[in-house]
Each structure stands twice: as C-alpha cells, then as structure tokens.
Amino acid sequence: MQKVSFFKSIHVKLVLIYMLLIIIALQIIGIYFSKELEENLKTSFQDSILQRIELVNYSIREEMLKERDDSTPEIETSLSVILKEFSKEDINEIIVSNNHNRILATSEDENQSLIGHRANYEIIRKAISSETLQDSISLDSESGKRVWVLAAPIRDTVGPNGEILGAIYIESNIEKVYEQLNEINRIFAAGIAMSLVITIILGILVARTITRPISDMRKQAQAMSKGNYSRKVRVYSTDEIGQLAIAFNHLTNRLQEAQSTTEAERRKLASVLSNMTDGVIATDRKGKIILINDPALSLLHETRESTLNRPIASLLGLDQEYSFEDLIHMKESVNLDFSMNDAPYVLRANFSVIQKETGFVNGLITVLHDITEQEKIDMERREFVANVSHELRTPLTTMRSYLEALADGAWRDENIAPTFLNVTQTETERMIRLVNDLLQLSKMDSQEYELSMEFVEFNKFFTRIIDRFEMSKSQSVEFIRLLPETSYFVEIDTDKLTQVIDNIISNAMKYSPDGGNVRFGFTVHDNMLRVMISDDGMGIPKENVGRIFDRFYRVDRARARSMGGTGLGLAIAREMIEAHGGKIWAESEEGHGTTVFFTLPYELDETGDWE
C-alpha cells in the first residue's frame, strides 16, 4: 500500500480545516469589531468636538454682540482669549471670521498675522452661505496626519432664523482616534495570534482523537493484506469511530475465520488435485485455462506457463472441431488421439460445466484419463477373438469338408477313407493343442498355477534338451554348442522351462534351411544367465521383431500355419520366463536368421542356498 504523504494525510487536513474556520470566524469578527470601533471612536471624538463648538459658539456670539466702549477691550483681543481657553491637544487651531469672511481671531500664535485678512477657506464660505455646519476629513499638508475640519455658522440668536454673524473654523486632530484604533487592532491581532496557536494545539489534539483510530485501522488493513490477522484496532471511545473500530475488529475475526477455512479448502483441493491420477483442467467463463494439475501437465506433456490463459480447445487439439460453446454442451466424453507411428497414446476427456444457481456459466472443468492401455487391451482383445475364431474355424472347416465327403460315401473307398480320417485326426489334435495353449495362457493370466521349483545344474539341463532334439531331427541342420565349462545352478520348474526351450528350438529348426546351423550357448551378465538360441532362417523384419511374443502373431501367417504352429508358443514362453524372474527378447535381421535370448537368476553352486 502506498504511503500517505504528510500534506495529504487526513490529520493535516482536519487541522487545516479547523484553522481555516477559526481564521475566517476571527476575520469576520475582527472586521466587524474594527468597523464598529472606528465608528464609535469617531463618533465619540466628533461629539466631544461638537460640544466644544457649542460652548465656543456661545461665548463668541456673546462677545460679538457686546457693545464696545473705550474701556472695553477690542473684539480681536477678547476673542483670542476665548479661543486659547478652548484650544486643547486634540484641537490644532480655531479661527473666527465675520460674515464678510474676514478673520477676527485665531488660536495659533504663528497665524496672528492673518487677523484682519480674508479667510481663504472654502469650508468657511460654505458654512456662511449655507448657514449649516460643514465638516470633512483631510490630510495635514505639513504633518501628513488626518485632521477633522469643520466650520459652524455663528447666529445672533439661538435658533435657525437668526442673523449670521460669522463662522467658527476648527481643525481637530482626529489622527489620535486612528492611532488608538490601530493600537486596539494590534492588541486584537496579538490576541488572534495567541488564539490561533491555542487553536492549532487544540486542533491537533482533536484531530488526533479522530485520526488515531483511523490510522490504526489503516495499519490493520495493511497487515491484513499481508495475511496477518492477529493485530487488533485499539478502541479509544464509544462514539461512532469507536463503534467503527469495534466493527473493524469483528470484521478482522470473520476474515481470519474465512481465510482459515478458504486456506484449508484450498489445501484439500490442492492435495486432491495433486494426488489424482487423472488430469484436471479448469477454465474461466471465456474458456481460458486458470487451473491445471500436475497429472494433466504430465498427460499433455506441457508446462504450466505454456497452458495458463490458453484456450482449452487449443490445448486439447479440438479447436478445429469444437468451439468452447460446443464443449460446454458436450454430454459425451471425447477421445484425444495423440498416437505416433510407433507409440499409441489416447486420452479420454470428460467435460463438466461450472454454473451459478442462476444458470450463469462460470467456466468448464475437464477431466483427462489415459486410456492408452485400455484401448490397447480392447484392440488386443478384439484381435485375440478374431485370431482364435480364425484358428478354430480353419481346422473345423477342413474337418467338416472331409467328414461330409466321408458321409457322402468316401468311407467305402479304401484308398481315400484312411487319408480323410488321418486329416481329420490331425486337425483335431491341432485344435486340442490350440485349446490347451489357450487354457495354459488363461491360467497364467489369472495366476492360477504353481511352479514346482527345484535347483538344477543348468549346463546339464540345457545339454539334455539339445541332445534330445539332435537325436530326433529329421533335417540336415547342424547344432553348434557354445556352453561354458563352469557349472551354474538355477532354481526352475523343469517342466515349464523345458516347454519354453522346446518351443524356441522347434521354431529355430522350422525356419532354418537345410544345411543351416542352430547355435546354443549362455553367458553370465549381472548375476543372470543369458541363454541364446540362434538360427540361420529367413529372419524377421526389424519393425516386427518386438511383436513375435504377442499372442497369435505371425510374421508369415500362411507359412507358419502350414508348419502347424498355433501362434501361442512364444507368448507362453514369455509368460514362463517372466514367472521365473527373467526376461525374453529376440534379435533378428531379415534374411540372416534370428536369435532368441532369455535370462534366469543363477547360483555358482546349490549349497549356498541350502545352508
């Protein structure tokens, strides 16, 4: 999870919002307070000046209406005395003019020279002409400070209908009001700054009470994303955030339980899938592979990286015949034939749809099963039945023909009847041998037989069998013996092994031409005797050598049948040798003869085992 920067954290945002609200509130209060304070101070100052003007106006009016004689001081002198009495720190200058706009007196000593001259003040003229009070706030040209200038008319009587005697001009120092206002504003600003500091501290504390549980829940969410459900959120209060923390802890417990259940089910599923002999493939709703177990990879000879997100039809080689929608509606199993020229390989695929309760298709499950051996067994079974039927039908057909001929009267012919009966007897014996061989193979397949094991010296045992065939041979075939002088003992069923060797030697003599050789010998390899019987016959094609031990298999069927074979001798030999713990195989080159090998466990002498 990405780390939250300082300025983007909710803690800072809450403090900033809290501060902005306080600042806005203080600004509104400050502006309102400053405006009202300014108005109040100006009003108080102006009221004070106006009250003085009334007193000054009264005193000047009395002085101007007074009758003068020689003993009475001049009006300019008396007016100057009055003005100096009323001139204070907040009044810069007071000027009195008559109705002709001539200056009669001034409070400023420096401006005494202006007495008797016309007053060059527009405000005085306005006050006399309009007979009303005139005022304005302007800047002093010398000091640059604000002054309140006003001019009030002087009437000879009290009331609005009196004659205008002149006017009073006053310059008051209203700058002190603004200085006082600025001082109050500075004090107010300092108070605001202190309030903001306290507000920030309180805001941090208040925001911390909100953000601390949220921060704990964020850390818990990060821990949960990593699989750690043991951490709990601390509950600081019982308010909404506290209730949220309690709910979050409850959610953590439920998630932990769900995760444990899911993980247990996942392990069960993984164990089932990995231990299944069948391959399992799961797809999403678009037919892309999302899960495949190891047996499926082994059956398809694929890697997991090459199969994931691949269409199921493409992986199974069905994309040319079926679409994913066809596989969803597939009710029957499909055989996948991956056979090569020399190796059959067939898989069976069964399809099952993953659906919600609403019927929405979530995906497809495919189960693969290797049916190569089953197909091979079925093919061998069909071939076996066909071969048995053929082998039995041939002598039966021959016997029926001769018996029908005998029944039609051939039994009366002394020259023909014995021949027909001899053929019938021969075919009967052939069927008996075939049935006996089949019964023997059936017992060996079902393991319903027992070996009568005994220790024999293999050199002498093998030699006796060879001697028997050499004495009874009717063709000019030479036997060559390549037997070692060392005695080797084997534990065998002499009857069963005699049958095996008889069958191999019989085949070698059958297929050896006149004047050919049959070679016998054995060697020792890895605690096993390797027995060899070789002929100079017509040989076997390379592609057929591995099948001569199959039941009823003949390289040249017509010639083999004419020689009286059943096609089961080598199959019986293989079963017998494997029952003795050995192996049997053949090596041949077409036109240059065939060599049959088989192995047997051996001992150098028979005393070791008896001890």
Image: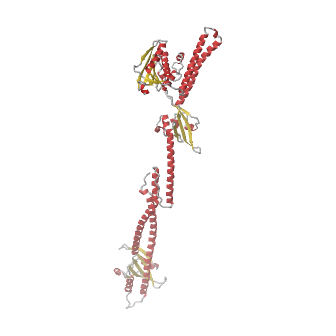
Q: Is residue 251 visible?
A: yes
Figure quadrant of residue 363: top right
Side of 414 where 296 appears, left or right = left
Q: How many marks?
A: 0
Identity of the residue furthest to the right in this view: 408
Identity of the residue furthest to the front in this view: 611
Question: In the image, residue 144 lies at what x, y percent?
Answer: 37, 72
Side of 70 where 211 appears, left or right = right
Side of 194 where 370 appears, left or right = right
Q: 579 or 32: nearer the eye? A: 579
Identity of the residue furthest to the left in this view: 110
Q: 324 or 519: nearer the eye? A: 519
Q: Quadrant location of the C terminus?
A: top left
Q: 26 or 509: nearer the eye? A: 509
Q: Is residue 533 visible?
A: no
Q: Give the colouring mode of the picture.
A: secondary structure
Figure quadrant of residue 431: top right
Relative to 175, does residue 526 appear above or below in the rendering? above
Relative to 410, does residue 384 appear above or below in the rendering? below
Q: 522 or 427: nearer the eye? A: 522
Question: In the image, residue 156 lies at what x, y percent?
Answer: 45, 85
Residue depicted at 57% across the width and 26% down the height: 382
Relative to 261, does residue 577 appear above or below in the rendering? above
Question: In the image, residue 277 lies at what x, y percent?
Answer: 51, 36
Relative to 356, does residue 39 appear above or below in the rendering? below
